[in-house]
Image (cartoon, rainbow, N blue to C red):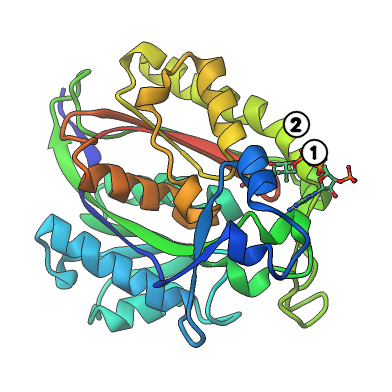
């Protein structure tokens, strides 16, 4: 029996022009390229220019995704923008993107699940599409984490970067068998008891300020691999797929050691893992679509490939999505 699936029609990304290397960073905080590379795998990250906002990054990535899909912006029904660094407390930056793309119908909203934001956004958009109510969704992850970093705190400022990525999902009828293209399953989790391990120490209703990222790095690390692999096992159980059938593992790019440990625990070989953390740092909700766009642009991800996404972040939140490109 046929069924409607949310199929990826295009993807695109945008990185701000400025690149900050570990060596340059080590001039302003007490750190070194050697320490950062050994503990995280990060070598450089991009930083938004003064005045360049999250919506600017999101708009550029969205235009690239539309071009990749060969689609006009007027064909988009809904926009879901995953971000923890919106331009303003309100309105949603998604509505700024909507206006800039000249879309005057449908609806747009921001979704906040920190580093898990893109996986959450895929799951939410997928639900709207498979319900049959909407046809095409623009799903974006965009962040300017550089604006909420304490640049004097070496335990956090070396980890993050700015950027944006976007995919366009289209509801299409699929055969309803193992060869179906599109989003096959999504699994979301959160556990608010872990709030103090990774949070921002400000906000509109607490301090009236934006605040800075605070993190117990070791605690985050300790939980990450187990949480990630748990939701991936949920995806396997729901679909009958396994690590053996995965063509590309595109994890949230927080830290090379978390990525490697997760892939190893799952039995996914390194050549099937897409890694961009070395060049992008942790771009939170933007990291997965940035990695997808990179692997698509260099020809790795091809139509029909089985692609596994996962993320874990503040909250804690975590989740997985399995899709056939
Ligand atoms: N440069 C040099 N030294 C540093 C730096 C730095 N940038 N940061 C910390 N140190 C020092 C510490 O002060 C400490 O020194 P001490 O022993 O004299 O006290 C020493 O290095 C060890 O510190 P730890 O925090 O124990 O180092 P660890 O090996 O745990 O690595 C790291 C820290 C990289 C943050 C690690 O815990 C980690 O990767 N955690 C996961 C966090 C993460 O990825 N968060 C991203 C957001 S969540 C997500 O996206 C999943």
Question: Residue drawn at (22%, 56%), measured in percent from left and top?
Answer: 136
Q: Quadrant of residue 12?
A: bottom left
The alpha-carbon separation of the residues under discs 2 and 1 comes to: 5 Å
Q: Quadrant of ligand 1?
A: top right
**Any part of residue 242 in sight:** no
Q: Report the quarter where the N terminus lies.
A: top left
Q: Quadrant of residue 205?
A: bottom right
Camera-side residue of 15 and 225: 15
Question: Residue drawn at (79%, 44%), measured in percent from left and top?
Answer: 194
Q: Is residue 223 above or below residue 315?
A: above
Q: Quadrant of residue 97?
A: bottom left
Question: Residue drawn at (72%, 57%), measured in percent from left and top?
Answer: 156
> The residue tagged with tag 2: helix, strand or loop?
helix
In contact (CB < 8 Å): disc 2 and disc 1 = yes
Q: Is residue 219 above or below residue 49?
A: above
**Any part of residue 43 in sight:** yes
Question: Residue drawn at (15%, 66%), measured in percent from left and top?
Answer: 75
Residue 261 position within the rendered picture, expressed as x and y whole percent measured from the top left: 59, 24
Camera-side residue of 233 and 22: 22
Ligand 1 closer than 8 Å to label 2 CB: no
Which residue in the structure is indicated by mark 2? 222
Residue 283 position within the rendered picture, expressed as x and y whole percent measured from the top left: 52, 57
Which residue in the structure is indicated by mark 1? 219
């Amino acid at each position: 029996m046929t069924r409607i699936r949310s199929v990826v029609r295009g993807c695109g990304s945008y990185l701000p022009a400025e690149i900050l290397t570990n060596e340059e960073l080590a001039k302003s905080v007490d750190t070194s390229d050697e320490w950062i590379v050994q503990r995280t795998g990060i070598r450089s990250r991009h930083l938004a220019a003064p005045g360049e906002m999250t919506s600017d990054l999101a708009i550029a990535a969205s235009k690239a995704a539309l071009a990749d899909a060969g689609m006009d912006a007027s064909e988009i029904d809904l926009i879901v923008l995953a971000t923890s660094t919106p331009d303003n407390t309100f309105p949603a930056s998604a509505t700024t993107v909507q206006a800039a793309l000249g879309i005057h119908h449908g609806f747009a909203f921001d979704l906040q699940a920190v580093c898990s934001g893109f996986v959450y956004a895929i799951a939410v958009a997928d639900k709207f599409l498979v319900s049959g109510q909407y046809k095409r969704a623009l799903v974006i992850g965009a962040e300017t984490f550089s604006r909420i970093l304490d640049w004097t705190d070496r335990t956090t400022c070396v980890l993050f970067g700015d950027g944006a990525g976007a995919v366009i999902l289209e509801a299409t009828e699929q055969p309803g068998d193992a060869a179906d293209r599109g989003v096959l399953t999504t699994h979301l989790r959160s556990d608010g008891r872990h709030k103090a391990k990774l949070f921002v120490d400000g906000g509109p209703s607490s301090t009236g300020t934006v605040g800075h990222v605070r993190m117990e790095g070791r605690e985050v690390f300790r939980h990450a691999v187990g949480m990630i692999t748990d939701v991936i096992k949920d995806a396997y159980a729901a679909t009958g797929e396994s690590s053996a059938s995965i063509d590309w593992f595109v994890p949230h790019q927080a830290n090379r050691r978390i990525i490697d440990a997760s892939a190893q625990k799952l039995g996914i070989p390194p050549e099937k893992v897409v890694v961009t953390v070395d060049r992008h740092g942790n771009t939170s909700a933007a990291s997965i679509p940035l990695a997808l766009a990179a692997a698509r642009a260099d020809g790795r991800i091809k139509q029909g490939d089985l692609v596994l996404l996962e993320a874990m972040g503040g909250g804690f939140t975590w989740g997985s999505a399995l899709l056939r490109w």
